[in-house]
Structure formats: C-alpha cells, structure tokens
Amino acid sequence: MLPTPDTEDPFLRDIVAALKTVYDPEIPADIYELGLIYSVDVDDDRNVAIAMTLTAPGCPVAGEMPKWVENAVNAIPGVKVTTVTMTFDPPWDMSRMSDEARLALNMF
C-alpha cells in the first residue's frame, strides 16, 4: 500500500512527510514525489516495511539511499524498526512522478 499525504491516519501522514525529506541528490524532487516509493506497510507493532526503487539501477547513491529512508522514518515517534527493500520490478519510469515533481523538473 502506498499512503497518500492526505490519508486520515496521522501515523501514515508522518511517514509520508518523512519520505518527502529524502531527495535524490541529482534530482531536485523528493523520492516520494518522484514515485520511487512502491509500498509502505505498517504492522501492529509499528514496524515499517518500505519497498522502493531508484531512477536507474546504476544510481550513484544506490547503496546509501535506503539508509537515508530508514533513518528518516525511524525518526518518527512510535516507529519500532524500518526495513527498506530495493526492487527494480517494475522498473521506474517518469509516469510514476507526481505533478509536483513534474513541475519542479519542468517536465510538463
């Protein structure tokens, strides 16, 4: 499940807000708006599992970005453990970007 910023669940809103603080250093848009987050699942103990991708498998921060995501979400009060899984299935493409990201990148 991918929560939206306007979800009624305040805990999920906090997770989305945390994800929006993580940026791909080569692109002036956050990873949530870029569509790099595929799913966010929270269990009853408030462990968070995130599936994400990168704009390209050879991304220079591929080894670091999952830790950035983990740290951002772990900073939310009440989160027990955050696990980030990288996947390239399906591959990312520009259609996953939000209008906000398209606007930031002049891609309209």
Image (tube, helix red, strand yellow):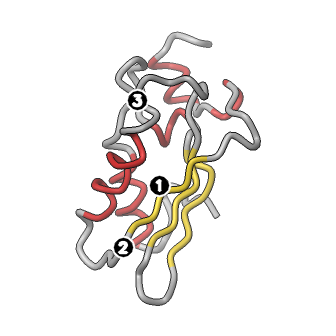
Q: Residue at x 46, y 38 (%)?
A: 31
What residue is shown at x 56% (from left), y 34% (from top)? 54
Gap between marks 1 and 2, in whole Å? 21 Å
- Residue 24's spot in the image, x, y percent? 40, 28
Mark before the other along the chain sequence, 1 or 2: 1
* Alpha carbon distance from label 2 to label 3: 22 Å
Disc 3 residue type (three-letter): Val
Q: CA distance from mark 3 to mark 1?
A: 25 Å
Whether residue 64 sits left or right of residue 55 in the image: it is left
Q: Secondary structure at mark 1?
A: loop
Q: Count residues near mark 2 (Cα–Cα under 10 Å), then give few for <14, some for 14-19, many for 20+.
A: some
Judging from the image, what secondary structure is the residue with disc 3 in? loop
* Residue placed most toward the observer, 89 or 16: 89
Q: Please give the label number shown on residue 89.
A: none
* SS type, badge 2: loop
Q: Which residue is mark 1?
A: 5
Q: Residues within 10 Å of mark 1 (few under 14, many from 20)?
A: some
**Residue type, numbered disc 1:** Pro
The quadrant holding residue 88 is: top right
Residue shown at 33%/53% (left/top)?
Answer: 18
Count every numbered label the image shows and give the total.
3
State which quadrant residue 98 falls in. top right
Write down the residue under mark 2.
81
Left or right of 104 on screen, residue 57: right
Q: Which quadrant does the N terminus fall into?
A: bottom right
Q: Tell me the residue that label 3 is attached to.
A: 61
Dot 2 or dot 3, earlier in sequence: 3
Q: Give the label, 1 or 2, closer to the camera.
A: 2
Q: Nearer the viewer, mark 3 or mark 1?
A: 3
